Amino acid sequence: MAENVSSRQDLARQGFVAIAVLMASILTALDLRMFGIGLADLRGAFGLSSDEGSWLGTFATAPQVLVAPCVGWMIAVFGVRRVLAGPTVVYSTASILIPYCQSFEVLISLHAIRAAMMGMFVGATMMTAFRNLDRRYWIVALAFYVIRIPFSQNLGLYTAGSYAQSIGWQWIYWQGAIVAPMIGMLFWFGAKPVEIDRTLLKRGDWGGMMIFGVSLTTLYFGLDQGNRLDWFQSGYIIAMLGAAAFLAGVFLWHESRVANPWAHVSVLLSRNIALGFVAIFCFMTASLGSSLLKPNFLVTVAHLRPEQIGDFSGPCAILLLAGATVTAVALVRIVKQRFALIIGFCCFALSAWLGTQLTSQWSLPEFKLIGILQTFGEEIVFLAAVATLLSNVNPARVIALTAYVQVVRLMCSETVGAIMATWIRQREQLHSYLIGLHVTSPTRGLGSMSLVLGHGSGSSGTQASDAKLGIGLLAGIVQREANVQAYIDGFWCTFLAAILGLLVVSLMTKSPAHPLTTQTLSS
């Protein structure tokens, strides 16, 4: 009887942990997505200039990079309860206070504190799951961690736009203030009580963790502001990138000399692990089709608001995500990681190719199949890639690996997003110039076309005013088509990333048996 009670209690505890992992993963990803989508509305609410809004976005994300890589080590030393109890309270408090801020300095400070606490949440999810769940449930926990990506991309658009238009932009922050304490309680009651690992604490590589975190944060500041300041035309960007490179070199030197390195780079020297990280980089680039290209096109060219985009994908997202998650877990279990990666990258390649057929007439329905393929691709590839990393690492070096997983998750996303935004901007300028070459004064029929456009717009003025209005409309058409061509170029980039991902997978070797991928291993 006592054994049955203990078994039920243990099952309930593991259920708490699984739900907490799901909620924490979704909260952090959804929070970032909602903030990015709602930044224009937030700028208006806080009365910020364009530059101030850009800096607010940077400070609202960069501190994640500072703390996230070392959270796995903190969990191993102090346990989940000690690490996450405080951050949930701090995060909720900052989220409640932010809408009432009047000072810009206080505003960015609270956003920075809030971002650091978010870094604690997402950095703790995988280590918490692996230390508190039976091995047969690890794949489920990892699937919960992965589901945050497509979930936030779909629901984030809808919620950010809906809050700003209906119940108030404040709920972009207050939503997290309600959910975070629930996550803290689930972790507190679900995680196993542990003693502080004083041996690991004494051997802590504090210098390595600090240098690594500052290096990544500096790099993030440079990347996030790069497109706005035109990259190497700005002394600030050159200084940030140079400082990040210098600190990265100091970190590698430090890790080669310290007695107990925290995250020695040698963990990346395994063939499958190195290729797994390259596959994640390809995944991050290929997934820009749904996270950046599709929504930006619909806003820039189709002139839709975020809630209109989300209204299409939001109701379908739950069923689609459930199907994609089950499919991803089944593929990793049955056909193993390499074949699952091939299937996922094929989904990305097909969706990107469909995106290259883009026209100015496209709206929500034309993106439906692309969205479905992207969702399946995101679930399958990231789950299989992380499973590849974990199944090939020495168990004694899992902490180091989880640190690099957090680095790749945050920095690859920012890097490819910044590069793609710059690419789209420059390609739009190029296409605008090339199209404009054919719309000049000597062009035959330009005058009559301008008159027709101006008169057709409902103008009742003179012939001169009709011509002037027509020229303006024609300029808008040129800009629209230039944007279309730029987004087509962006989809070609994601297509090439998917093909590169397939080539990377072809170089992988068979991974050893692991609880994530083999059902027969006992817990």
Image (spheres, rainbow, N blue to C red):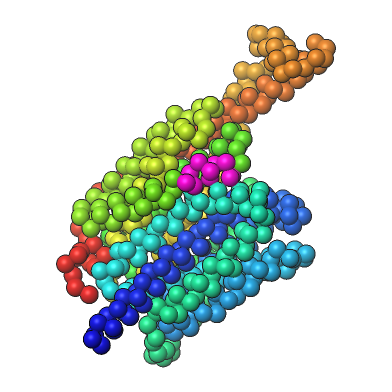
Determine whether, in the image, residue 175 is placed left or right of residue 374. Answer: right
Q: Residue at x 44, y 48 (%)?
A: 317
Report the quarter where the N terminus lies.
bottom left
Question: Residue 109, how many percent across, how many down?
Answer: 68, 69
Question: Residue 54, how many percent across, how many down?
Answer: 66, 54
Question: Residue 234, how many percent across, how many down?
Answer: 66, 52
Q: Residue at x 40, y 73 (%)?
A: 16
Residue toward you, 217 or 88: 88
Report the quarter where the C terminus lies.
bottom left
Question: Residue 126, how many percent across, how many down?
Answer: 39, 69
Residue toward you, 105 or 392: 105
Q: Residue at x 58, y 33 (%)?
A: 302
Q: Is residue 24 visible?
A: yes
Residues drawn in magenta: 306-315
Q: Residue at x 46, y 36 (%)?
A: 367
Determine whether, in the image, residue 84 is placed left or right of residue 48. Answer: left
Determine whether, in the image, residue 520 is placed left or right of residue 259. Answer: left
Residue toward you, 447 or 30: 30
* Residue 464: quadrant of the picture: top right
- Would you place residue 299 above or below residue 270 in this image? above
